[in-house]
Image (cartoon, helix red, strand yellow):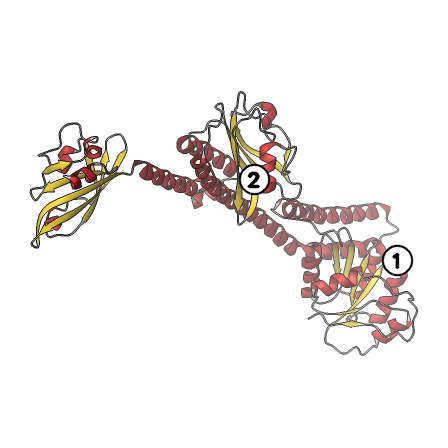
Amino acid sequence: MRAEHIVASLEKGVAILGIDFKITWANDPFREWCSQDPIGKSLLEALDEVSLVWPEIFPFDGLLTGKPTSLRLQFYGNRYLDVTISPFRERDCVVELIALCSDVSETVSRQQKLDALHRAGQELAALDADELTEMTVDDRVELLKQNLRRHIHDLLNYNVIEIRLLNPATQELKPLLEEGMTPEAAQRVLYARAAGNGVTGYVGATGQSYLCRDAETDPHYIKGAEGARSSMTVPLVFQDATIGTFNVESPKPNAFGPEDLQFAELFSREIAQAMHTLNLLRAQQSCTAVQAIEAVNRDIALPVDDLLSLACTALKDAQDKPELVQQLEQIIANTRTIKQKIQNVGDDFARLSPGGNIPIRLRGMRILVIDCDERIRRSAHALLEKEGCQVETAATGQEGITLARASHYDAVLMAIRHPDIGGTALYRSLRELQPDCRVILCQGFEYDGSHTLVNVRQDGYWLPVLYKPYQPNQLFKALTCSPPSSLDCPSRQPEVVHTS
């Protein structure tokens, strides 16, 4: 009697079954799940309107051999019971079965929601490979917005939402998606700062979630939705860095609890992952465009240089023909414009790519490269134009002199050996034509039989001599280094910089 009283007082449902699987006794919690008296009925008959979730078949044989088993049953109406059935033995024989039942509806519902959130996250930025080639970045952003709206409504049941993305350079939280916010709130400029920028700014600055339980008294809250009385704001975090905020508002005070906050934080991770994927797509598109621009520039750079050299040579010989001079000058100007336009397009794509910054230390510098080695001329274009330089090249010393006579350059990179003119003569011609220009000598591993280095030292040459092929750091250093206090030092030997 006492044992029965103890078992009857348990919060969990308990039922005793005979070896015929009919219920012989049940406590009150178990009876509450039954629409009629369960005595004499099987477990599934007593628990009216239930189905077996797992296992697929009721384990009759296993129970009679003395093995405990577990079941999950589902009531119509989305309620769930977990049932553990254990055999009771007397003299090594199973004489009764004890069923211990727990209502796990909240646990199952929670897991289902978590699974749905995970699936939603996978779908947020999921795009078919064929679709990617046809979609612009703006198209992908719009698809992401549509997926976000759908999942936020269906899973979280929120109707007033706002998502902002953090600009790392300015710390501004830029609107990505809003629904139900007032026009003023949707257009409001907010920064990731702990004060003066609402709850959103506070969360963006601290990286901590925030529950505003009463909008009328909360010191951080700034009106977002009409009639809102509470809000919940969580950071969008990717790899431990805050990249934005996710805000939800409600017309009810204290509308959000710890579980709402947990689900919002979980979904915010999926949003952050989707945004990261989108940024990679944007970077991939920009990178592809930059590579295409570089390929075009690489293919046309030397032919355009040849055209410039020919035009400048023809211009020198056509001084007594005004009409021809005018046409040649127009060709030279148009050719340089084409090169500049291509470079500007590449700069624009580099600037638009995430984290893209155009270097400024050499930007705008006009550089002439004089070298008979086509690989060196191509290398100069590739290295220096990435730094924003305007590069023109010449294959012979005389072509270099012609270009130097017709245009101004900030620097000249000249090889010390040429098939048509000695290095010393070329250096002195360049210095005469361009007295303010920085002329940098470049040497391969060949012997300097004309003693160019010795001769230019006597002329006061102070810059480092670069070995070819160019190494970027040493090349940039030679283009930007400052002169010594005295330029005319006969005892000073030219410094040789090994760059390969």
Quadrant containing the N terminus is: top left
Which residue in the protein does label 2 denote?
Answer: 244
Name the residue located 85 percent from the left edge and 59 percent from the top edge. 437
Which residue in the protein does label 1 denote?
Answer: 436
- In screen coordinates, is 115 left or right of 391? left
- Going by the numbered disc 2, the residue's amino acid type is Gly
Closer to the chain start, of discs 1 and 2, is 2
In x, y percent, where is residue 7?
A: 20, 40
Q: Secondary structure at mark 1?
A: loop
Name the residue located 72 percent from the left edge and 48 percent from the top edge. 340
Distance CA(mark 1)–CA(mark 2) = 51 Å
Q: Is residue 398 above or below residue 321?
A: below
Q: Is residue 161 above or below residue 110?
A: above
Q: Quadrant of residue 189?
A: top right
- In screen coordinates, is 335 left or right of 228? right
- Checking the image for residue 350, the label placed there is none
For label 2, the crowd category at 10 Å Cα-Cα, with few meaning under 14, some 14 to 19 and many 20 or more, is many
In x, y percent, where is residue 346?
A: 65, 48
The answer to whether residue 150 shows anywhere in this view is yes
Numbered label tally: 2
The front one of 265 and 138 is 265
Q: Nearer the viewer, mark 1 or mark 2?
A: 2
The answer to whether residue 166 shows anywhere in this view is no
- In screen coordinates, is 100 left or right of 233? left
